[in-house]
């Protein structure tokens, strides 16, 4: 599980399915499917190959798929729209850190909404942006 360089190609988008195992890639992104095209850009610009896992349900959530991905990649970036504090990403990060601690090459990272109330008119400023996701991906890969 060395290095942060890519294994070529773009991101692998994963929708959890029982008994499916994609080829290895050096980064796991969890929860947000909305940043897939930014993952394509990372692959092209930085040579970072990302595995995007789109969790379709929060209860139950597919721990096995995320754990298998993190076991292969050594990294986890969780993105969702809820606030970072008490958001579901905290559960994912905690569960994966507990199960994959010795296989992690960087601490799990959450890219989420800000911890502040916001008026709907400012939603675009509140939600995690592609730039924030990309910045955290680069930071985790270069940890």
Image (cartoon, rainbow, N blue to C red):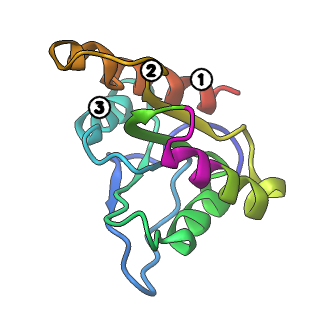
Q: Position of residue 87 (x, y in %)?
A: 50, 42
Q: Which residue is mark 2?
A: 114
State the residue at coordinates (65%, 26%).
142
**Local crowd at mark 2 within 10 Å, few (<14), some, or many (≥20)?**
some
- Magenta residues: mostly which secondary structure? helix
Q: Secondary structure at mark 3?
A: helix
Q: CA–CA distance between discs 3 and 2?
A: 20 Å
102 relative position to 58: left or right? right
Q: Which residue is mark 1?
A: 139
**Local crowd at mark 3 within 10 Å, few (<14), some, or many (≥20)?**
some
Q: CA–CA distance between discs 1 and 3?
A: 15 Å
Task: Say which label, 1 or 3, has the lower sequence index.
Answer: 3
Q: Position of residue 112 (x, y in %)?
A: 44, 31
State the residue at coordinates (59%, 23%).
139
Q: Secondary structure at mark 2?
A: loop
Which quadrant would the C terminus be assigned to in this image? top right
State the residue at coordinates (35%, 48%).
11
Q: CA–CA distance between discs 2 and 1?
A: 19 Å
The answer to whether residue 28 is seen in the rendering is no
The answer to whether residue 45 is seen in the rendering is yes
The magenta segment = 85-93
**Local crowd at mark 1 within 10 Å, few (<14), some, or many (≥20)?**
few
Q: Is residue 52 magenta?
A: no
Where 77 falls versus 19 (above or below)? above
Q: Secondary structure at mark 1?
A: helix
State the residue at coordinates (42%, 81%).
20
Q: Which residue is mark 3?
A: 38
Q: Position of residue 64 (x, y in %)?
A: 56, 74
Of all residues shown, which one is farthest toward the bottom?
19
53 relative position to 67: left or right? left
């Amino acid at each position: 599980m060395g290095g942060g360089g890519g294994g070529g190609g773009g991101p692998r988008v994963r929708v959890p399915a029982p008994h499916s195992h994609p080829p290895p890639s050096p980064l796991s992104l969890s929860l947000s499917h909305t940043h897939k095209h930014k993952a394509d850009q990372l692959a092209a610009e930085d040579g970072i190959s990302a595995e995007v896992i789109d969790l379709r349900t929060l209860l139950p959530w597919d721990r096995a798929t995320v754990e298998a991905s993190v076991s292969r990649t050594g990294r986890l970036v969780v993105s969702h729209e809820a606030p970072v504090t008490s958001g579901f990403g905290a559960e994912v990060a905690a569960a994966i850190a507990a199960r994959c601690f010795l296989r992690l090459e960087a601490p799990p990272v959450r890219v989420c909404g800000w911890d502040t109330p916001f008026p709907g008119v400012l939603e675009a400023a509140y939600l995690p942006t592609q730039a924030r996701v990309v910045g955290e991906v680069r930071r985790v890969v270069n940890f």
